């Protein structure tokens, strides 16, 4: 793992990141104590920062997903109280557009998480409330059955591989079970059809230590039948040692 230049003018907290191609976008956050509408992106080929057109509405820590080459930004407030719930950014046209809000009949809960699956945008209601799905091709909303999506609301990180569903246990990773005790310290990302898992681990030393290690594992997936998917750890090692004051906030995968 190597360091890259920091963005000196990006918000330092409550921003969200995502990646398209070789660009990493930093969206929303707080600047001078107020939510920001500014958007910055990092060119992973030239290692330079740039500013994109600002969002129509300032947002702090929004949910961000990439769908059909566009960046969808979702407000995490009460759905029924937001007149500007979702905007999307088209990097090719360099413009923002608004997504029509779902009708009042199918809303009424805070959004706990969002996810793109089968070229649709899913919004998961908080604490078991109703979840909805947006279909861009039809420009329509619909209610989603909670029984299929409930578990996603309770976990801190997730990624989609080949649109697999319904929920199943990933078999073959018995030696990896200890990660389940780390919860918020674990981050998952789709790494070319494999799962890259990154997590924090404190450095143990006599007299204490002010360091922590960032570990990474790459897990290949194998579908053995229609019901079972097995994982195999292809690689696992420490990729970075940092101060214990650092935090593994978000992970994205880029094409360089």
Image (cartoon, rainbow, N blue to C red):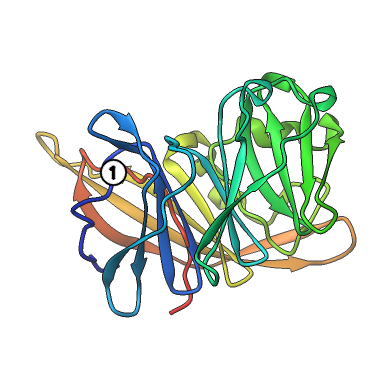
Where residue 255 appears, x then y in whole percent?
Answer: 48, 76
Front in this rendered view, residue 75 or 2 = 75
> For this view, does 148 lie left or right of residue 171?
right
Where residue 98 appears, x then y in whole percent?
Answer: 63, 47
Front in this rendered view, residue 126 or 55 = 55
The residue located at (66%, 61%) in the rendering is 231
Q: Is residue 215 above or below residue 29?
A: below
> For this view, does 215 lie left or right of residue 47?
right
The residue located at (35%, 73%) in the rendering is 44
Front in this rendered view, residue 200 or 10 = 10
Front in this rendered view, residue 51 or 199 = 51
Q: Is residue 114 above or below residue 32?
A: below
- Quadrant location, the N terminus: bottom left
- Quadrant location, the C terminus: bottom left
Residue underneath mark 1 = 11
Badge 1 marks a residue whose secondary structure is loop
Q: Is residue 130 above or below residue 192?
A: above
The residue located at (78%, 42%) in the rendering is 133
Where residue 33 appears, x then y in whole percent?
Answer: 26, 28
Where residue 55 appears, x then y in whole percent?
Answer: 46, 47
User: Furthest-right residue in view?
Assistant: 226
> For this view, does 191 lie left or right of residue 223?
left
How packed mark 1 is, by other alpha carbons closer than 10 Å (few <14, some 14-19, many 20 or more), is many
**Snapshot quadrant of residue 216:** bottom left
The residue located at (74%, 54%) in the rendering is 117
Total marks shown come to 1
Q: Is residue 41 above or below residue 8?
A: below
């Amino acid at each position: 793992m190597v360091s890259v230049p920091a963005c000196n003018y990006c918000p330092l907290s409550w921003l969200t990141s995502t990646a398209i191609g070789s660009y990493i976008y930093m969206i929303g956050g707080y600047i001078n104590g107020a939510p920001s509408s500014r958007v910055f992106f990092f060119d992973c080929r030239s290692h330079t920062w740039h500013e994109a057109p600002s969002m129509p509405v300032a947002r702090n820590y929004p949910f961000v997903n990439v769908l059909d080459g566009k960046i969808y930004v979702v407000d995490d407030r009460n759905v029924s109280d937001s007149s500007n719930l979702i905007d999307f950014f088209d990097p090719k046209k360099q413009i923002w557009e608004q997504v029509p809000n779902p009708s009042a009949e199918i809303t009424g809960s805070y959004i706990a998480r969002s996810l793109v699956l089968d070229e649709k945008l899913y919004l998961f209601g908080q604490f078991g409330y109703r979840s909805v799905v947006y279909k861009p091709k039809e420009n329509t909303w619909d209610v989603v059955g909670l029984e299929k999506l409930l578990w996603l609301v309770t976990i801190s990180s997730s990624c989609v591989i080949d649109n697999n569903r319904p929920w199943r246990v990933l078999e073959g990773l018995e030696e990896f079970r200890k990660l389940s005790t780390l919860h918020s310290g674990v981050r998952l990302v789709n790494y070319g059809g494999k799962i890259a898992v990154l997590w924090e681990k404190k450095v143990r030393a006599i007299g204490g230590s002010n360091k922590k290690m960032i570990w990474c594992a790459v897990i290949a997936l194998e579908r053995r039948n229609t019901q079972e998917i097995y994982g195999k750890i292809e690689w696992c090692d420490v990729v970075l040692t940092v101060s214990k004051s650092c935090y593994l906030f978000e992970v994205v995968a880029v094409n360089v």
